[in-house]
Structures are given as structure tokens and as C-alpha cells.
Image (cartoon, rainbow, N blue to C red):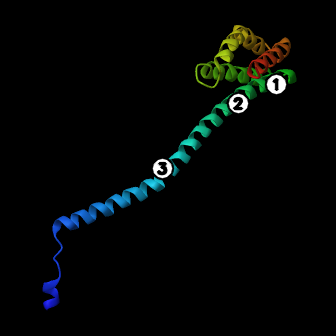
Amino acid sequence: MSEDLERKPITSSSAIRRYIIYAGVLIVVFLLGLIPMWLKARTAASSLTETENQLVLCKTQSDLASAVIDARRGDYEPARQALSRFFTSLSTEKDNSSYTEAQRNSLQPLFAGRDELITLLARNDPASADRLSDLFVAYRKIMNG
């Protein structure tokens, strides 16, 4: 019994101080784990954005290539639909960050013959295949710089 009386009682201020120290250590350990994961997630998000931009550009070029191939084969309706998707995607993405400023300026003349090409395809005109091939070469030249 005398041992119980000789122990120092824990004061509330020392208990609070101990809890604050534990909480501080816990926060430091949490941040040591959080910061590297946050940096890795930020890098992955940046890489994902770049990959998505490249995918959009590839899909746009694929639509134009499909239109050229379909027109060469005499399948004018699928060619017209693919060309329409190409111009829709091109006009949407032209304003986004997928293209550089020089590419945006160079893409503007491609829109000049859009309606005429779509009309040629709607009329099943074989001359549309050559015009589409020229458009594809011009687009690829712009994209490759």
C-alpha cells in the first residue's frame, strides 16, 4: 500500500502533452507516406493526360484514313460518315490543347473543302477518293511538322 502512495500521480497537463507528442508523431508518419504517393499520382495523371491527347489525335487520323480507304473501295456512305467524324473531331480538338499553335493555324485551310468533299461522297463521285487522299497527305504533313 505504501508503494501506491509513493507513485507520482499523472497530472492532466503531462497526459495532454504526451497525447500531443503521439499525435504529432502520427501526423509526421502519415505525411511521410502520403507525400511520395501524391507525387507518384500527380506524375501518373500528367502521363495519362498526355496519352489521352495522343489517343484523340490517333482517332482523328484514323477516321480520315478510314474515309480514304472506304472511298477507294467505292463505299461512299461509310466514307462520308468517317469524314464527318474527322471534321467534327478536328473542330472540337482544334480549340483544345491537343494541337500546337502552328498546327491550329495550318489546320484552318483544311475546312475550306469540307462541304464539297461531303457532297461528293454523298453523290458517290469517284473523284472524292483522290480529294480525300490529298486531304490525308495534307493532314499528315501538318501533324508531322
In the rendered structure, find residue 129 and report the number of the disc placed on it: none
Disc 3, SS: helix
Q: Marks 3 and 1, Cα distance to the nearest angstrom?
A: 52 Å
- Amino acid marked by disc 1: Asp
Label 1, label 2: how far apart the Cα atoms are:
16 Å
Foreground residue, 84 or 91? 91
Disc 2/disc 3 C-alpha distance (Å):
36 Å
Q: Which amino acid does label 3 sit on?
A: Ile
Sooner in the amino-acid sequence: mark 2 or mark 3: 3
* Marks 1 and 2, the one that precedes in the sequence: 2
In the rendered image of this protein, does residue 58 appear above or below residue 124? below
**Picture quadrant of residue 144:** top right
In the displayed structure image, the side of residue 51 where residue 16 appears, left or right = left
Q: Name the residue under label 2.
A: 59
Q: Is residue 33 above or below residue 108?
A: below
> Of 69 and 9, which appears nearest the observer?
9
Report the residue marked by disc 1. Answer: 70
Image x and y of residue 142, in percent? 75, 18
Label 1 close to label 2 by CB (< 8 Å): no
Mark 3 and mark 2 in contact (Cβ < 8 Å)?
no
Residue 35 - label: 3
